[in-house]
C-alpha cells in the first residue's frame, strides 16, 4: 500500500524503436538521453532491464520524469522485439531465437527451472502450483559469484537458493556460505549486489529442514528429489536385510513380505523397508510374534505371546512406570505415564517445544518436535499414528539440546571462550563439545542440559552475541 503521492506511473508513455537488434541497447539509451535533457528525471526511479533483463525475459528501460504542470510521467523505452516479448511473454521468444548463443540465456534458465519442478512426477499437485508460481516472480535480487558472474534470483531468495542456482551438486553439498566475505546462515536473505561464495563438504546432504530455508521452485524440487532418493536407498538397504532374514528362515520372500506390511498397518512395502533401515523396530523381536507353517509366517495368537514382545498398533502393550525425573506429558488428553514413551533422539525436544506423539511399530510412543526433520514424513505417511501431546509444567527434568556454532577461527582460545560462556556465565552443564577447524572458520557442536525452551533460547542469544560468532542454531537432527 502506498500513498497517492507515491504513485509515479499514473501517466505513462511508451517509446518503441524499430531498430536492428545489435543497436537496441545503444538506441534505447540515446532516447533516454533525449527525454532527460528535456524533462527532469527522478534518479531513484530509473530501471535498467535492457542491460540486465528480468528473470522472466522482460527487457525495457524505465524512468520517471517531471512533465508538464509538474506531473510525474513514467517513460518506457524498448525495441519492437522487446515490446513483443513484453506483450506476448515467452511465446514470442522463439521468433527471435535465431540470435547469438547466450542472448536468451535468461529465458532458458527459467525454462530449466520449470523443467526441474516437472522432473518429480510423484510431487504434490498443490506444492507444484506453489513452486511454479514462485518462478513467475516479478521482483528480483541481483547477486554475484566470486568470479563476477551475475545471478538473478527472486526477491527474498536465500544463500541456499543461490547454491542451488549455481549447480545442483553445489546445493546438495552446501556446508556454509560467505556473503561479502562474511559467514552467514544458509537461510540468510540476499540483497542486491551481494557477492556470494559457497563452501561445500562431501559428507553434507540435504535435510527436510532445508525446505524452510529456500524460496525458489528449483531448490525445493531438488531438495525433495534428494530426500526421495535417500529414502529409496535406505529402503533398498531395509529390503536386503529382510531378504537375508527370510533366507535364513528358509521362507519365500514374495509370499511373506506382505504379511509384515499388513501386520504393521503400513501402506506399502517401501514403508516396511524404510522402517527396517531406520531401526524403527527390531526385526528379530517382531518375528517372535510369528511361527512358520507351510513356508509362511503365521501370527501367533495373543495368549501365546509374551507380554513384553513388541506388537504393532492396536495390540496389547506392557505399560511402564515413569522413571524418576522423566518429563511429564499429556498424550491425547491423558497422562503420558499410561504409555511407554521416549523423547525422540532425532530432534531432542525440550519442555516448551511444540510436540506430537508418534506411535511406533514396537517401541511405544516417541515424542517429536513439530519442527523435527522427520515430522513431515511421519505426518504424511503415518497420520493415523500421530497423537496430540503437550507438556505438563515441571522444573525437575533436564533436557539435552545440541547447538551448531559457526564462527571465525581465532585460534586455540575459541573452546575456552565458549566453554566459559556456557558453564560460568549461563550456568549450564555441557554434555559434549567438539570443534572442527576449516579455512578461516570453525564449526562446533555442543550438547548442553537445559530445563526448558526459554532457557535454551537465552543460551542461543547469548552465544550469538559473542565476538567472532557468525551463527548459533539448534541442531534439528
Image: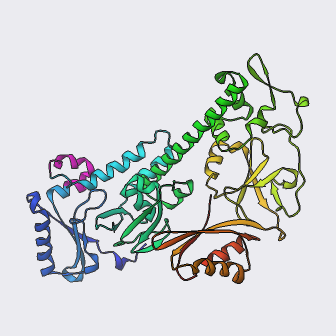
194 versus 389 height, above or below: below
The percent coordinates of residue 214 (x first, y second) are 47, 59
Residue 8 or residue 142, whichever sits in front: 142
64 versus 245 height, above or below: below
The percent coordinates of residue 363 (x first, y second) are 78, 45
Q: Which residue sits at x=28%, y=71%?
A: 9
Q: Is residue 256 left or right of residue 236?
A: right
Q: Is residue 268 left or right of residue 70?
A: right
Residue 385 or residue 428, whichever sits in front: 428
Q: Is residue 235 magenta?
A: no
Q: Residue furthest front?
A: 412
Q: Which residue sits at x=37%, y=77%?
A: 4
Q: Main secondary structure of the magenta part?
A: helix
Q: Residue furthest top?
A: 294
Is residue 268 in sight in this rendering? no
Is residue 36 in sight in this rendering? yes
The magenta segment is 84-99
Q: Which residue sits at x=38%, y=68%?
A: 196
Residue 125 or residue 214, whichever sits in front: 214
Residue 47 or residue 312, whichever sits in front: 312
Q: Which residue sits at x=66%, y=81%?
A: 421
**Could you tell me which quadrant the N terminus lies in?**
bottom left
The percent coordinates of residue 165 (x first, y second) are 38, 57
The percent coordinates of residue 140 (x first, y second) are 35, 65
Amino acid at each position: 500500500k502506498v500513498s497517492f503521492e507515491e504513485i509515479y506511473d499514473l501517466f505513462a508513455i511508451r517509446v518503441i524503436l524499430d531498430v536492428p537488434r545489435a543497436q537496441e541497447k545503444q538506441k534505447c539509451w540515446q532516447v533516454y538521453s533525449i527525454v532527460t535533457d528535456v524533462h527532469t528525471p527522478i534518479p531513484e526511479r530509473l530501471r535498467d532491464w535492457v542491460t540486465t533483463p528480468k528473470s522472466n525475459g522482460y527487457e525495457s528501460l524505465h524512468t520517471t520524469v517531471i512533465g508538464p504542470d509538474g506531473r510525474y510521467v513514467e517513460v518506457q523505452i524498448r525495441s519492437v522485439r522487446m515490446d513483443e516479448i513484453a506483450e506476448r511473454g515467452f511465446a514470442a521468444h522463439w521468433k527471435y531465437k535465431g540470435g547469438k548463443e547466450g542472448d536468451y540465456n535468461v529465458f532458458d534458465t527459467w525454462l530449466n527451472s520449470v523443467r526441474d519442478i516437472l522432473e518429480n512426477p510423484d510431487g504434490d499437485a498443490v506444492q507444484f502450483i506453489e513452486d511454479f508460481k514462485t518462478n513467475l516472480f516479478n521482483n528480483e535480487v541481483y547477486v554475484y559469484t566470486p568470479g563476477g558472474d551475475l545471478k538473478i534470483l527472486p526477491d527474498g531468495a536465500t544463500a541456499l537458493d543461490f547454491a542451488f542456482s549455481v549447480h545442483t551438486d553445489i546445493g546438495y553439498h552446501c556446508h556454509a556460505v560467505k556473503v561479502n566475505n562474511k559467514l552467514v546462515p544458509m537461510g540468510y536473505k540476499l540483497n542486491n549486489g551481494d557477492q556470494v561464495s559457497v563452501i561445500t563438504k562431501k559428507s553434507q546432504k540435504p535435510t527436510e529442514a532445508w525446505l524452510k530455508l529456500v524460496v525458489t521452485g528449483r531448490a525445493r524440487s531438488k531438495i525433495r528429489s534428494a530426500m526421495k532418493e535417500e529414502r529409496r536407498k535406505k529402503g533398498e538397504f531395509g529390503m536386503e536385510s529382510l531378504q537375508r532374514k527370510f533366507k535364513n528362515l528358509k521362507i519365500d520372500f514374495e509370499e511373506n513380505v506382505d504379511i509384515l506390511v499388513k501386520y504393521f498397518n503400513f501402506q506399502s512395502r517401501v514403508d516396511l523397508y524404510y522402517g527396517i533401515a531406520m531401526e524403527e523396530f527390531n526385526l528379530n523381536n517382531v518375528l517372535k510374534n510369528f511361527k512358520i507353517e507351510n513356508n509362511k509366517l503365521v501370527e501367533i495368537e495373543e495368549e501365546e505371546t509374551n507380554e513384553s514382545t513388541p506388537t504393532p498398533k492396536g495390540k496389547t502393550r506392557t505399560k511402564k512406570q515413569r522413571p524418576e525425573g522423566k518429563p511429564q506429558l499429556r498424550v491425547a488428553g491423558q497422562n503420558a505415564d499410561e504409555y511407554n514413551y521416549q523423547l525422540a533422539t532425532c530432534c531432542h525436544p525440550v519442555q516448551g517445544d511444540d510436540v506430537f506423539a508418534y506411535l511406533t511399530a514396537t517401541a511405544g510412543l516417541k515424542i517429536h518436535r513439530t519442527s523435527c526433520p522427520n515430522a513431515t514424513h511421519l505426518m504424511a505417511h503415518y497420520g493415523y499414528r500421530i497423537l496430540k501431546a503437550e507438556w505438563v509444567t515441571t522444573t525437575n527434568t533436564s533436557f539435552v539440546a545440541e547447538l551448531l556454532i559457526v564462527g571465525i577461527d581465532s585460534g586455540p582460545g575459541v573452546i575456552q571462550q565458549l566453554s566459559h560462556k556456557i558453564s560460568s556465565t549461563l550456568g549450564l552443564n555441557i554434555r559434549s563439545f567438539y570443534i572442527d577447524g576449516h579455512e578461516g572458520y570453525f564449526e562446533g557442536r555442543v550438547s548442553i542440559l537445559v530445563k526448558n525452551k526459554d532457557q535454551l533460547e537465552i543460551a542461543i542469544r547469548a552465544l550469538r552475541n559473542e565476538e567472532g560468532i557468525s551463527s548459533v542454531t539448534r541442531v534439528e537432527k
